[in-house]
């Protein structure tokens, strides 16, 4: 366990690991309402890179499924694939900046006390 009572990376079960490749292309297709061909195209366009099973089948993680959900949502709003990439890039940058701000605030509060 870590200090915040979350399991350390080696202590997590595969079910708790959001990056573990569990979902097949058929399952992701059904979950998101995308065709397998659309999922293969997004892979060819380097939007996601699912791992491969020993038999060569694509396996998507929960994180990748969430990313694909966001891609579908943006595409459904009429945003092109290059636009989707930019939106996702900016969202990631915002998240990183929010984390940095939180760290700086924590450090400041520790020095103020």
Image (cartoon, rainbow, N blue to C red):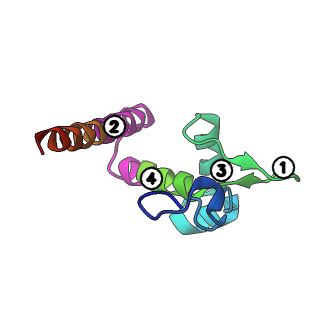
* Residue 26 screen position, x and y as percent: 68, 64
Quarter where residue 65 is shown: bottom right
Say if the magenta span includes residue 53: no
Q: Earlier in the sequence, mark 1 or mark 2?
A: 1
Q: Which quadrant: the N terminus?
A: bottom right
61 or 77: nearer the viewer:
61
Marks 2,4: beta carbons within 8 A:
no
| Secondary structure at numbered mark 3 | helix
Q: Which quadrant: the C terminus?
A: top left
Q: Measure the C-alpha gap from mark 3 to mark 2.
A: 32 Å
| Secondary structure at numbered mark 4 | helix
User: Is the residue marked by circle 4 packed among few (<14), some (14-19), or many (20+) residues within 10 Å?
Assistant: some
User: Is the residue marked by circle 2 packed among few (<14), some (14-19), or many (20+) residues within 10 Å?
Assistant: few
Q: Earlier in the sequence, mark 3 or mark 2?
A: 3
Judging by the rendered image, the residue that carries numbered circle 3 is 37
**Which stretch did the figure color magenta?**
73-97
Q: Is residue 74 above or below residue 86?
A: below
The reply to whether residue 19 is visible in this rendering is no
* Residue 40 screen position, x and y as percent: 66, 46
Q: Measure the C-alpha gap from mark 4 to mark 3.
A: 14 Å
Judging by the rendered image, the residue that carries numbered circle 1 is 56
Nearer mark to the viewer, of 1 and 2: 2
| Secondary structure at numbered mark 1 | loop
Q: Main secondary structure of the magenta part?
A: helix
User: Is the residue marked by circle 1 packed among few (<14), some (14-19), or many (20+) residues within 10 Å?
Assistant: few
Nearer mark to the viewer, of 4 and 3: 4
Quarter where residue 105 is shown: top left
* Residue 90 screen position, x and y as percent: 32, 34
Judging by the rendered image, the residue that carries numbered circle 4 is 72
Judging by the rendered image, the residue that carries numbered circle 2 is 96
The reply to whether residue 10 is visible in this rendering is yes
| Secondary structure at numbered mark 2 | helix
């Amino acid at each position: 366990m870590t200090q915040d009572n979350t399991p350390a990376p080696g202590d997590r079960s595969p079910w708790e690991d959001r990056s573990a490749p569990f979902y097949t292309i058929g399952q992701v297709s059904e979950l998101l309402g995308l065709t397998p061909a659309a999922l293969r195209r997004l892979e060819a366009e380097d939007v996601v890179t699912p791992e491969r099973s020993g038999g060569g089948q694509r396996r998507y993680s929960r994180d990748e499924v969430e990313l694909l959900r966001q891609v579908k949502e943006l595409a459904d709003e009429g945003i092109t694939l290059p636009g989707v990439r930019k939106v996702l890039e900016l969202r990631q940058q915002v998240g990183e900046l929010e984390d940095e701000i939180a760290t700086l605030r924590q450090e400041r509060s520790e020095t103020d006390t």
